[in-house]
Image (tube, rainbow, N blue to C red):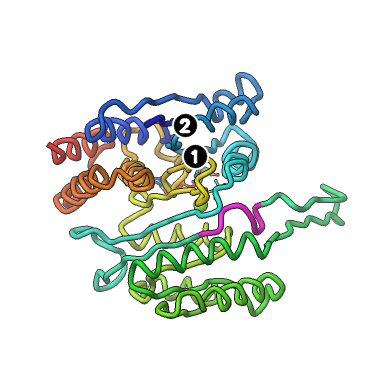
């Protein structure tokens, strides 16, 4: 396996180093290429993600990324110019974000409910495309637009992917949108779901407005099996999903080109966490579970299962004592045997 590694900013390198040590234990001999991308390179050279970087990254089977974003850089420069550029250039249209409450992990929700769902977040469209602008900037008459782009092709392919995932799980799909206000995009999403539903007659379908979904996510997350939603709603709902499933430090994701043309990219849902960077206290579990998604994506199910079990064992026995990034890595490597 040829793996492109982008450790990135803040806690990115801390959690990726641990994740790589775990990967190396279950699958020795993975060929890794480290790409120096992020705030440090930007300050040094002015480069974010060059064509040469992208060409080189394309020559790998998958990408493992830590986090991108740093307080020393104007918000958006690294996120748009590097992270989103990569997701778009590599056509990462399925942004897969599973949530599971592991045994022994305490949810902040009353009664520690069963949580086991997957969010299929559209990854290359919506309000993320950079379609917009601003005029009269800095004046009292400033106008800024940020247009949400939704194509039938782009929506239908993630809806179909979500239905297929639901069919192999508990056969229930929920569309989350805002069809009562965003009527143009909402109507298209709803029709795409209705049309594709015909191909999956055994999958039941529900619909929640995004605002109500934030209620159900904290009052009744057990209702969800597979959620399909647009790029921005998916970003927001998956941070809540992480929080209710034991914390953002456990939430993994895959940015997948389901056509297999480009390497898919696996990364924690969380960001660079500047508030705890350099202190050795970031939880590397999200990065490790991102390796699990990566291994499954490439067909290494046995190795993925082994890591999953070791993570489960660690989480079940952690207790309330704070553990460091390094200690969690050691505990998981010991559990792997
Ligand atoms: N995919 C990505 O690379 C990604 C994702 C989200 C945010 N960002 C960027 O990261 C920077 C910081 O963003 P933010 O502060 O809004 O979100 P964040 O996810 O970095 O942090 C939010 C909170 O969660 C905590 N946290 C995050 N990861 C943790 C971990 N592994 N263990 C323990 N606690 C953890 C942080 O300490 C913080 O209190 C910004 O520049 C943002 O754009 C990048
Ligand atoms: C950093 C940002 C561009 C990114 C997103 O909004 O997709 C992040 O919040 C995430 O969830 O991966
Ligand atoms: Mg996010």
For residue 329, above or below residue 193: above
Label 1 sits on residue: 263
Q: Position of residue 125 (x, y in %)?
A: 64, 56
Residue neighbourhood size for the residue with mark 2, other residues' Cα within 10 Å, grouped as few (<14), some (14–19), many (≥20):
some
Q: Within 8 Å of ligand 1, the CB of disc 1?
A: no
* Mark positioned earlier in the residue sequence (2 or 1): 2
Q: Which residues are magenta?
A: 121-128
Q: Residue furthest top?
A: 44
Q: CA distance from mark 2 to mark 1?
A: 6 Å
Callout 2 touching callout 1 (CB < 8 Å): yes
In the picture, measured across the screen, residue 103 lies left or right of residue 3, that is left
Q: Position of residue 30 (x, y in %)?
A: 33, 28
The residue positioned 49% from the left and 49% from the top of the image is 256
For residue 64, above or below residue 187: above
| Residue 278 among magenta residues | no
Residue neighbourhood size for the residue with mark 1, other residues' Cα within 10 Å, grouped as few (<14), some (14–19), many (≥20):
many
């Amino acid at each position: 396996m040829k793996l492109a590694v982008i450790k990135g900013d803040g806690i990115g390198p801390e959690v990726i180093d641990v994740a790589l040590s775990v990967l190396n234990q279950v699958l020795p001999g993975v060929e890794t290429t480290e790409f120096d991308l992020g705030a440090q390179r930007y300050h040094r050279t002015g480069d974010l993600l060059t064509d040469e970087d992208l060409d080189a990254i394309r020559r790998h089977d998958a990408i493992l990324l830590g986090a991108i974003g740093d307080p020393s850089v104007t918000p958006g420069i690294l996120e748009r110019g590097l992270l989103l550029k990569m997701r778009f250039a590599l056509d990462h249209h399925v942004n897969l974000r599973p949530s599971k409450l592991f045994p022994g992990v305490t949810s902040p929700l009353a009664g520690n409910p069963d949580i086991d769902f997957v969010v299929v977040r559209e990854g290359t469209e919506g309000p993320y495309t950079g379609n917009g602008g601003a005029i009269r900037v800095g004046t009292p008459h400033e106008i800024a637009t940020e247009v949400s782009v939704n194509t039938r092709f782009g929506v239908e392919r993630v809806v179909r992917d979500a239905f297929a995932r639901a069919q192999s799980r508990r056969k229930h799909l929920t569309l989350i949108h805002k069809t009562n206000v965003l009527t143009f995009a909402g109507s298209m999403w709803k029709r795409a779901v209705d049309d594709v539903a015909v191909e999956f007659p055994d999958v039941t379908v529900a619909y929640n407005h995004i605002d109500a979904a934030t209620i159900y996510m904290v009052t009744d997350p057990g209702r969800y099996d597979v959620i399909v939603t647009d790029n921005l709603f998916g970003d927001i709902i998956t941070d809540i999903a992480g929080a209710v499933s034991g914390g953002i430090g456990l939430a993994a994701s895959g940015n997948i080109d389901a056509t297999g043309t480009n390497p898919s990219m696996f990364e924690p849902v969380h960001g660079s966490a500047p508030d705890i960077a350099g202190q050795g206290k970031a939880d590397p579990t999200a990065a490790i579970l991102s390796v699990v998604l990566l291994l499954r994506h490439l067909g290494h199910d046995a190795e993925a299962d082994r890591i999953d079990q070791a993570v489960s064992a660690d989480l079940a026995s952690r207790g309330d004592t704070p553990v460091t990034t390094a200690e969690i890595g050691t505990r998981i490597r010991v559990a792997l045997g």
